[in-house]
Amino acid sequence: MRAAILIVAALAACPAAAQDSQPGRNLAAGCAICHGTEGRSSTRELPSLAGLQKDYIIRQMADFRDGKRPATVMQQIARGYSSAEVEAMAAWFAAQKR
């Protein structure tokens, strides 16, 4: 028990454990492999996400998650994010210039 308390205290004191000021950006970083840096895809096969409306991105992720939109891997990927995480990523992508 004492070890667990010490670990929690150490994490709380660590700057990296502090609340992230840009969670959307950090979550969206994983999307870059397919959708390009800052959501600007370099290929026509994969859509750019930069500048899309936040609500549109949220709706598409929900459709992937629920199996309403066919995809190769996005259905699995979408299931890995909470609604709050999707909202944060969507807001970040929406704020990017196309």
Image: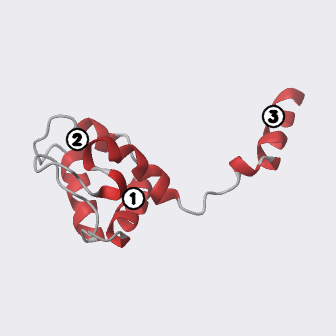
- Quarter assignment of residue 70: top left
Left or right: 12, with 47 as reference point: right
Among numbered discs 1 and 2, the one appearing first in the sequence:
2
Distance from Cα at disc 3 to Cα at disc 1: 30 Å
Query: Residue 59 placed where, x, y %?
Result: 22, 61
In the image, what residue occupies the spot 83% across and 40% down? Answer: 10
Give the camera-side residue of 14 and 45. 45
Q: How many marks?
A: 3
Kind of element beneath mark 2: helix
Among numbered discs 3 and 1, the one appearing first in the sequence:
3
Q: Is the C terminus in the top left, top right, bottom left or bottom right quadrant?
A: bottom left
In the image, what residue occupies the spot 34% across and 63% down? Answer: 93
Residue positioned most to the front: 42
Question: Which disc is residue 54 wearing?
Answer: none
Among numbered discs 3 and 2, the one appearing first in the sequence:
3
Q: Is the N terminus in the top left, top right, bottom left or bottom right quadrant?
A: top right
Left or right: 80, with 61 as reference point: right
Query: Residue 88 placed where, x, y %?
Result: 43, 61
Distance from Cα at disc 3 to Cα at disc 2: 35 Å
Q: Name the residue under label 2.
A: 74
Residue type, label 2 = Met
Kind of element beneath mark 1: helix
Q: Name the residue under label 1.
A: 89
Q: Mark 3 points at which residue?
A: 7
Residue type, label 1 = Met
